[in-house]
Amino acid sequence: MNRKVVLGTGVVVVAAVTIGVYASANKGDAATSKTSVALITDAAGIDDKSFQQSAWQGLTSWAKANDMKQGKGGYTYFQAKTSADFETNINQAVANGYQNIYGIGFPKTPAINAAAKKYPKNNFMIIDDIAKKRQNVVSVTFHTEQSSYLAGVAAAKTTKTNQLGFIGGMESAVVKTFETGFVAGAKSVNPNIKVDVQYVGDFADAGKAKTIAASMYQNGSDVLYQAAGGAGAGVFTEAKDLNEKQTKAHKVWVVGVDVDQAADGVYQATDGKSNFTLTSATKGVGTAVKDVTERAATDKFPGGQHLVYGLKNKGVAVTRGQMSAGAWQAVQKAQKAIVAGDVKVPTK
């Protein structure tokens, strides 16, 4: 099985790890630099226009500010083709001397748990899940239900059909927080609003996400919130295909996720240029990566801790995007209520 490993500035395709590499990996506790970092990603990689891209941007931003180069002794990423590669890629990262190894996304949790036990002198982080408590692993989660609630408010204030859609990636407790928050936010505006909920089954199948989006739009939903990682690109593709055939006034909308996806909503309608990204529910994965890397660099790695980022500490947010003045005002009001504790957003 092949997988992509980035060393230096080039991309190298590495065959399945041999016994010899495993042997050297077992000796890999002594890394070459206490600040060296390797990201462990899935098949969607660091340009998924979602949380893995955010993690990479956060890491490269920190590296640039601290004169850390890409490659051994600096930073890199290991991209898996399937989940079976996660543990292998972590072993490879340790063997190549990376001290801090970050699993970007909850599917990497089992591999991170195993590696944290196997390599006690290395530091590990898991994003979007809580790992087994060890002094060399930190867990990072986000109050994504809060930003999703605000996205639901925006969608409910924008829809003309009183029918919305939610497209998730892999059905899990983490992605359920996006769904639950979105539905709660929408129903806070209109208790009778309908929300069609469907899941792709993974975070990479953009074709399936496009098919789901097409069905939802055809059945009357005019605002879709996609929390599907790289698969979410299919939702944008479907919206663009539909919107290019009609006037701006009849557009259907997409709500972006994890990063600001406004650029993905630019299109040419029959009566001029427009944008169908209503807003984006952003998640500060890059902020968390920078935060933890800075702590590791100053010998304050938060091992054994569970760090939580939400609206209050600016770990999640929504963009202004293309919201009307009324929708934006409603979103700001809801945000203040959540931060003040007057609104408790459900997570499941």
Image: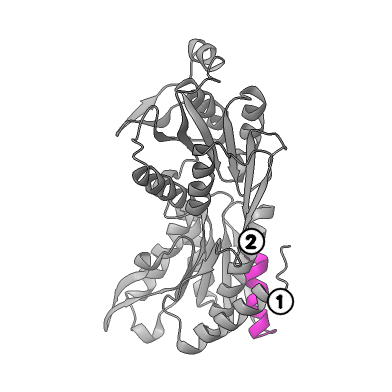
Q: Quadrant of the C terminus?
A: bottom right
The type of residue carrying mark 2 is His
- The residue drawn where x is 49% and y is 44% is 294
**Magenta span includes 42:** no
Which numbered marker is on residue 343? 1
| Residue 215 in the image, given as x and y percentages of width and height | 52, 68
Q: Amino acid at mark 1?
A: Val
Say which mark, if any, is on residue 143. Answer: 2
Compare marks 2 and 1 and give the one earlier in the sequence: 2
Q: Position of residue 336 (x, y in %)?
A: 62, 78
Please name whichever residue, 121 or 231, is drawn nearer the observer in this view of the structure. Answer: 121
Q: Position of residue 265 (x, y in %)?
A: 37, 69
Magenta segment boundaries in residue numbering: 179-192
Is 127 rendered above or below residue 26? below
Q: Nearer the viewer, residue 166 or 135?
A: 135
Q: Is residue 10 left or right of residue 85?
A: left
Query: What crowding class fits label 1: few (fewer than 14 Cα within 10 Å), some (14-19), or many (20 or more)?
Result: few
Whether residue 198 is visible here, answered yes or no, is yes
Residue 87: which quarter of the image? top right
